[in-house]
Image: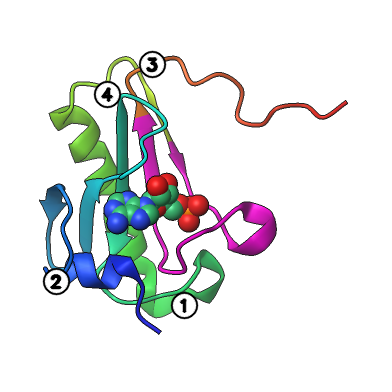
Amino acid sequence: MSTIFARIIAGEAPATIVYKDDLVTAFKDIRPLAPVHILIVPNKEIPTVDDVTADDEAMMGRMFTAARKIARDMGIAESGYRLLVNCRDNGGQEVYHLHMHLLGGRRLGPMLARRD
Ligand code: AMP
């Protein structure tokens, strides 16, 4: 079943697109958690990172090279950034179309808060 991200990629829903090529599309997160918060999304509909196959390896590599290019374009390459992929319920995934978060522009703190 298509998600909002498929409609954004198809140009049927609004988004601020910052990068697009034959394999991935990147746009600004609508509820940013950092000064720079971009979502890098495969053009092909894949629900979760647990659904990728060997056929998707080129696309997955492109997600990283696109992230690197966007980080440079947005001036956060030197200060640093975080790439993050959530998977299913325990991973906190809300939108079931694979995506990588690119976060930066401030010190992000520890990756996970300790619960004890
Ligand atoms: P996740 O929890 O990893 O599935 O993250 C989903 C992300 O998608 C959240 O950070 C949302 O703010 C973001 N999001 C949801 N709908 C939209 C939208 N229409 N445009 C841009 N970002 C969105």
**Labels 4, 2: front one:** 2
Q: Is residue 65 visible to the viewer in this orientation of the structure?
A: yes
The amino acid on which the numbered mark 4 sits, given as a three-letter code, is Ala
N-terminal-most mark, 1 or 2: 2
Name the residue that disc number 3 marks: 106
Question: What secondary structure is found at the residue carrying circle 3?
Answer: loop
Given the current orientation, which residue lies at the most extreme right position? 116
**Labels 1, 3: front one:** 3
- Labels 4 & 2 near each other (Cβ < 8 A): no
In the image, residue 63 above or below residue 28: below
Q: Residue 95 at x, y = what percent? A: 45, 63
**Labels 3, 2: front one:** 2
Q: Residue 44 at x, y = what percent? A: 29, 76
Find residue 18 and name its label: none
Q: Which image quarter is the C terminus in? A: top right
The amino acid on which the numbered mark 2 sits, given as a three-letter code, is Glu
**Few, some or many residues within 10 Å of mark 3 (<14, 14–19, 20+):** few
Name the residue that disc number 2 marks: 12
Name the residue that disc number 4 marks: 77
Q: What residue sits 44% from the left and 76% below the top?
A: 54
Q: CA distance from mark 1 to mark 3?
A: 34 Å
Magenta residues span 83-103
Q: CA distance from mark 4 to mark 2?
A: 31 Å
In this image, 90 relative to 80: left or right? right
